Image (cartoon, rainbow, N blue to C red):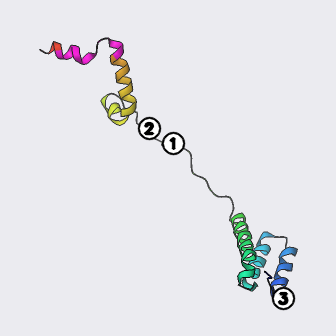
Amino acid sequence: MPANLSPEYKDAQEKFRRAREPQEKLECLREMLRTIPKHKGTEHLQAEIKTRLKELTDELGGPKKGAVHGGPELTVRHEGAAACATWRSRCTAASRASSASRGSGGRARDSKASR
């Protein structure tokens, strides 16, 4: 579908092509978006201009800060029963292994001894 671009848009497009600085390009792209005719034939051109605008604004915004990957300053190591309450999946496997290494099971012996 024909775009039927206006002379104002063509002038802004030529300025954009001649622009060297990112800030100057950004201003030209805004002018292009302002002067482009808004109809079905220019939808793809509008999308392309908006994409270029976003890329330039991201570039001018500077580098994005990532997440800080440092651990907590204070670490509390759980020991004993608290560890089993907090790290249940690890402790159940560990307690099974330790009871199996004791022989016939620690609870059975304890219950017989208490009679």
Q: Amino acid at mark 2?
A: Thr
Q: Which element is circle 1 on? A: loop
Q: Which element is circle 3 on? A: helix
Picture quadrant of residue 54: bottom right
Single out the mark in the foreground, 1 or 3.
Answer: 3
Q: Amino acid at mark 1?
A: Gly
Say which mark, if any, is on residue 47: none
Q: Which residue does the numbered mark 3 point to in the structure image?
A: 7
Q: Is residue 86 above or below residue 109?
A: below
Q: Which residue does the numbered mark 2 point to in the structure image?
A: 75
Q: Residue furthest front?
A: 1
How far apart in space, not on screen, are marks 2 and 1 (Cα)? Answer: 9 Å
Q: Residues within 10 Å of mark 3 (few under 14, many from 20)?
A: few
Nearest the eye: 82 or 8: 8
Q: 95 left or right of 44?
A: left
Residue 106 counted in the magenta span: yes
Picture quadrant of residue 35: bottom right
Q: 77 left or right of 18?
A: left
Q: Amino acid at mark 3?
A: Pro
How far apart in space, not on screen, are marks 2 and 3 (Cα)? Answer: 67 Å
